[in-house]
Image (tube, coloured by chain):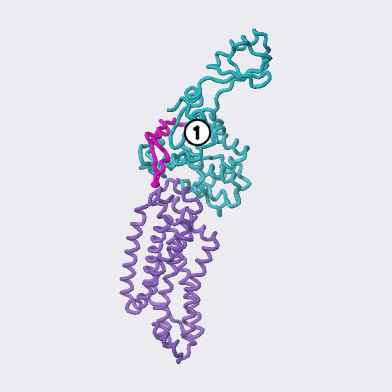
Amino acid sequence: MQAIITEKLSKTYPGGKEAVRDLDLSLGEGEVFGFLGPNGAGKTTAVKLLTGLLAPSGGQSRVMGLDPVTQVEALHALSGVVTEHAQMYDHLTGTENLRFFGEVFGLSQEEARERALDLMGQMHLEDAQDRPLGTYSTGMRQRLSLARALMHRPRMLFLDEPTSGLDPESTLHVNRIIRTLAREEGTTVFLCTHQLRYAQEVCSQYGLISNGELMAQGSLEALRERVLPGLRLMIRASGMPEGSAHTRVAEGLYELALQSEAEIPALIRQVVRSGGDVYQVTPIKPSLEDIYFALTGGQEAQP
Amino acid sequence: MKNALKAIVIKDLRGITANRQLFAMILIVPIVLAVVLPSAFVLVSHFLPEEMGELGRLLDKIPGLAGLGQRELSLVINYLIPVFFLLIPVMASSVMAASAFVGEKEKQTLETLLYSPLSLKEIFRAKVLAAFALGMLVSALSFGLMLVVMELLIWLLKGVFVWPNLNWLVVLLLMAPALSLIAITLIVRLSAKAKSVMEAQQAGGFMVLPLVMLAAGQFTGVLVLSVWLLLALGLAAMALALFLLSRAMRRFSYEKLLQ
């Protein structure tokens, strides 16, 4: 079953702002989907449409086979959502917050208590579990929000900028949790972020959005294939043969554009045959950032 | 009751005690209306000299304050004080309702609650129930406190007890719940638009208080007339409350709540 399918999903706010336009998405179960774009691109609106908190002005969607417009309670029962605007109660302790939301999501008091303790441990928040949330740092709050979203073991997880405000160590930790959830429990993750490098570390599928429109969707390989085919090669050598299409980056460092990795052995043989010594060969594939900027820069591959 | 709804009601009630400003308001208003004001009435009616000139004539016009005897004290307790007493459930429920709806919005916790598998109706019901429960709890405690203080005071001054009559039964079991529910629905309606608890409370105060004062002006007359008329009025208020309550949710949607 597809975890998320949308067809021409659109949202125009009462003020006339077109936040999402004709969004066509398709996402399999157990994927970690990176929904990427700058602030204001329409990511949060998309999450609200998919979780039923906003009514679409056009098109339709299915999340886990459910319609967010008409089956919103059933959808919420199997989704967990972390967004910047979904906070918890400052006067309650971390554990009390988790237990409260656990009970609201249908857990018994006993289940909620056990699950809360377990998740506080997973998020490395044991030391702060009996402190009021008001005393937590931004990073701790963010981790507690993730714990809150996981209380009822959701099959679908929506994370809107889950690592904003986290230090590098916490970010790594959260990444590990997200990957484990997807791999071991089959949880589908819909992750919105503007940090493309971060997304590349954790996601298996990507959707690139700009000004409310989806520009491209697929795995990193598929996106490279479509948007920036070929690769760049960095060679550290004593010299390059006459006539090869290289650019000299620095003394003894050259850059070449290739169609595929298959061209590398022949190229190296050519360098050696012409009397050059090769010290290092580094193929560089386009990063998500390169792809995103290629797309927004208005280059060839528009959808 | 569903476990989830119970959790929300308990959390809301606990939230009030955590907010000192709101908690102080919920404590002070009942003390003024159920202890200070009634005591003042009794003391004034006891120590007031027979001839008071202008003030005496003014006080003469207020039903229940005209004389000094036991009958007059009974008038004060059973006909005058209930009018002021009714402000207690209205105030307590309004404060709680404003905090429960706009407070959540202000602290950005409403959205988290909206992502739960509870329907908007269920969340609404839990919040109304919490506000209503607080209104009734504060009313009951205020009445108990007032009864103890009043009886003690009258006994000390007159050596007798003057007991509350049937009016109080109608006030406590019908008028107080009905007015409390009406106040809650009005606040809830306002709170969908209000941006802060303060704003909702102020708007609520502007709407609720004149209504209550208007009713109170007429109400003393009703109390004096007959308990049956009071009962009819109570039933009408309750019917209005239930009608407003059933309609209060109609215009709500996730989108409207989060605006």
A27 magenta-colored: yes
Res B175 → quadrant: bottom left
Color used for chain A? cyan
Tell me residue B33's x, y (percent).
Answer: 47, 73
Pick the front one: A47 or B64: A47
Q: Which residue is mark 1?
A: A34
Secondary element under disc 1, as helix, strand or loop, is: strand
Q: Amino acid at mark 1?
A: Gly
- In this view, the residue farthest toward the front is A243
Answer with left or right where residue A243 lies relative to residue B175: right
Q: Is residue A268 above or below residue B30?
A: above
Res B77 → quadrant: bottom left
In this picture, which residue range is highlighted in magenta? A1-29
Tell me residue B78's x, y (percent).
Answer: 40, 78
Q: How many marks?
A: 1
Residue at left offset 43%, top offset 66%: B205
Pick the front one: B134 or A4: A4
